[in-house]
Amino acid sequence: MTRMLPLCLLLLSSALAATALPKLTFDAGLLGVQATVRSLPATPRRDEPDFFPPAHLTVRLGPDNGALHELNVYPVAGLLAQYPERPGEVRPQLDRLKTLLQTRRVPPLASELPFLPLVPAGQVLHAAVAYLNFPGGHGVRYLTAYSQEVAPVTRQQVFYTFQGLSDDGRAYVSFQYDLNLKELPQDVTSAADRALLQTLMSPDTQRVQTAWNSYLTRTVKRLDALTQDPRLTRLDRFVRSVQLR
């Protein structure tokens, strides 16, 4: 006689399978660093603007010296279970990424590109956008910066990121890497940005908006010129080495 599992056990088994962490491989040698891989449990949510990830894989690339050199793989089912609200915070990032990967267009400057982990700040810009495939998945890479204020970005703020999905839609891949680009000023008080800072403090909102838009256009153009720069394509090669099983 065939025994039937109770429905609750079947549902639990399906949920566990959906949130199971994949096997992850990559070639850290392409970056000339050693990697530390950890499997982390879910972080319970609190009523705070921080990101509270589900159980996931995290990879530290190089020494733990404060630099942003990190790869994270989140189960999509775990993300949605952790953030079930609609529209909520996570679901729009997933929807935005899926749309981008279907159209493979360069979004206008005024739009935000998908990004996880969630950041309690605004995405200032995106530049040097390119679409990359890796074995078993695909995604978008770009340069970006986040800030809670309207001010010129510095070389410490702008970083490389890759946001991708596995082909089966079960895993979200997020990779961040600091670049310290010499094309950008060391700090906001640099000579090149002093006039802009003065304008941004003006009570004339129209003047402020015009100056800010002009600044963003110039900065994005400067960063777009780095699309095929070796500093970025080296990171692209690392992304292409990522495999999920």
Image (tube, rainbow, N blue to C red):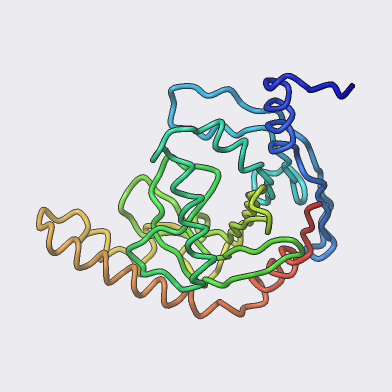
Q: Residue at x 27, y 59 (%)?
A: 197
Q: Where is residue 184 shown, x and y percent of the image?
A: 47, 67
Q: Residue at x 49, y 22 (%)?
A: 46
Q: Where is residue 124 shown, x and y percent of the image?
A: 39, 57
Residue 185 position (above or below residue 166): below
Q: Where is residue 55 shown, x and y percent of the image?
A: 68, 32
The front one of 45 and 96 is 96
Residue 173 position (above or below residue 56): below
Q: Residue at x 54, y 37 (%)?
A: 80
The front one of 53 and 143 is 53
- Number of numbered discs on residues: 0
Q: Which residue is most to the right?
A: 1
Whether residue 228 sits left or right of residue 192 in the image: it is: right
Q: Residue at x 22, y 57 (%)?
A: 200
Whether residue 245 sits left or right of residue 18 in the image: it is: right
The front one of 94 and 52 is 94
The front one of 218 and 128 is 128
The answer to which image quadrant residue 207 occupies is: bottom left
Give the position of the N terminus as an image quadrant: top right
